[in-house]
Amino acid sequence: MALKECTKKEEANSYELVVEVDGETFEKAINAVYKKQVKNINIQGFRKGKAPRRIIEKLYGAEVFYDDAIQDCYPDALYDAAKEADIKIVAVESLEAVEAGKDGFTFKAAVIVEPTMEIDNYKGIEAERKSTEVTDELIDKEIDQVRERNSRLVTVEDRAVENGDTVVIDFEGFVDGVAFEGGKAEGYNLAIGSGNFIPGFEEQIVGHSTGEEFSINVKFPENYQAEELKDKDAEFKIKLHEIKTKELPEVDDEFVKDVSDKDTLDEYKEELKETIAKRLVEESDKDFDNQISEKLIELVEGEIPEAMYENQTNDMVRDFEMRLRSQGLDVDTYMQYMGMDKDALKGMYREEAEKRVKLRLALETIARKESIEVSEAELEEEYGKLAESYSMEIDRVKAAIPAESLSEDVKVQKALDLVKDSAVIK
């Protein structure tokens, strides 16, 4: 296979390639197609699937397997041509075989390529470091969250409803004096202040006592999901059966034994201090990386093809679909439940996709400007990390991830490390 021509078109990042596939490669592709298709071919005088290739070609023409063989040759031929032309193809707009015969075939490809970007002033970027100091307030906050998770609801009989209580109520809603569908429930548990009901509903229960029967008046929002109730005034008749409040456990050694493997409060606080310290460092590192990334996105310059954004968006949507399937869901059900179509789903990821594309191009450009290379030892180390991460044999990882692709990823990471190491901490 060989690149005959590489012509830059008027449109930015667009090229036309003329590629020649040699006869030996084409012959192998034709034979592979024959072996795949012969099982479905019936020819008189031969058992089904046993007709020789020369007989089929004699009956149907020498070109009978050409189209499928050409299609099978395209990916490798394009890859080799792009490598020879020193371009990275991000989208193929068209493919056209212009000549084919026993000596091979030639085709034209209109492609979109990764742009050549520019970036300056990436060294000495100013960034802040979030504090990683573990204060007593942070430890107390962590303990309060554990207390919340271990709280229980107890019945209150000596006071009226307060914000934060949970009430057990019967209710029925009316519009213009007529009960409406879905507006009635008995023994319903409602957390006051949760915002689960329409505005004004929960607030009007505050101040009432157990056993009371009363009415409240509310107005349905203009964007309410039920069309017939949008922007309508409604009356709800309420019967208050029970008031419950959250009771938090006391913070003492017994509490510590219940929620951890420690015996004393002091031991528990020391453990929390270590946990919080680790979390703060991770949060600080992530925030620092985000600041650097945002600045690089601002600094990188060049005309980025729409196809790159589209490809990244599609990759993110596919990842999301895989996560859904791992949870026993499918994307069509999700979209129906959320009231969205595929375009809306892609729209959820578009902004982040653009950032990822720009950041990757920025780091690739820095790697090029800094002449960053990856040694065989570094590549082997990275394969080892991936093998350990995925609990796979290293040879299987190498088979799944080409060295060239992994090397590009390592270059990008080294470029990011270079920028981070040169950053100025404010």
Image (cartoon, rainbow, N blue to C red):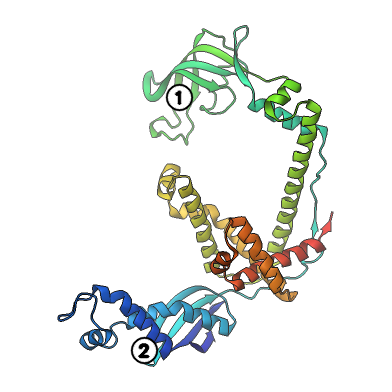
Q: Are marks 2 and 1 in contact (CB under 8 Å)?
A: no
Camera sees residue 374: no
Q: Residue at x 71, y 71 (%)?
A: 377
* Comes first in the chain, label 2 or label 1: 2
Q: Viewed as shown, does residue 371 lie left or right of 42?
A: right
Point 20% across, 74% down: residue? 48
* Image x and y of residue 282, in percent: 73, 48
Q: Furthest-bottom residue in view?
A: 103
* Residue 109: image tag: none
Left or right, 413 with respect to 189, comes to right
User: What amino acid is labelled 2 in the image?
Assistant: Ala
- What is the C-alpha distance between the residues marked 2 and 1? 75 Å
Above or below 145: residue 54: below
Please state which of residues 400 and 144 is positioned toward the viewer in this rendering. 400
| Element assignment for label 2 | strand
Whole-percent x, y for residue 132 in the image: 80, 44
| Rendered position, 389 above or below 142 | below
Residue 143, position in %: x, y?
Answer: 73, 29
In-image side of 29 versus 41 (left or right): right
In the displayed structure, 127 sits above or below 409; it is above
Q: Which residue is mark 2?
A: 100
Q: Which sits in the foreground, 254 or 211?
A: 254
The quadrant of the rendering that contains the C terminus is bottom right
Q: Tell me the residue at 53%/52% (across/down).
A: 348
The percent coordinates of residue 57 (x first, y second) are: 25, 86
**Nearest the eye: 385 or 317:** 385
Of the two numbered discs 2 and 1 in the rendering, the one whose residue sits closer to the viewer: 2
The residue that disc 1 covers is 233
Q: Mark 1: which amino acid?
A: Asp
| 93 relative to 26, above or below | above
> Element under label 1?
strand
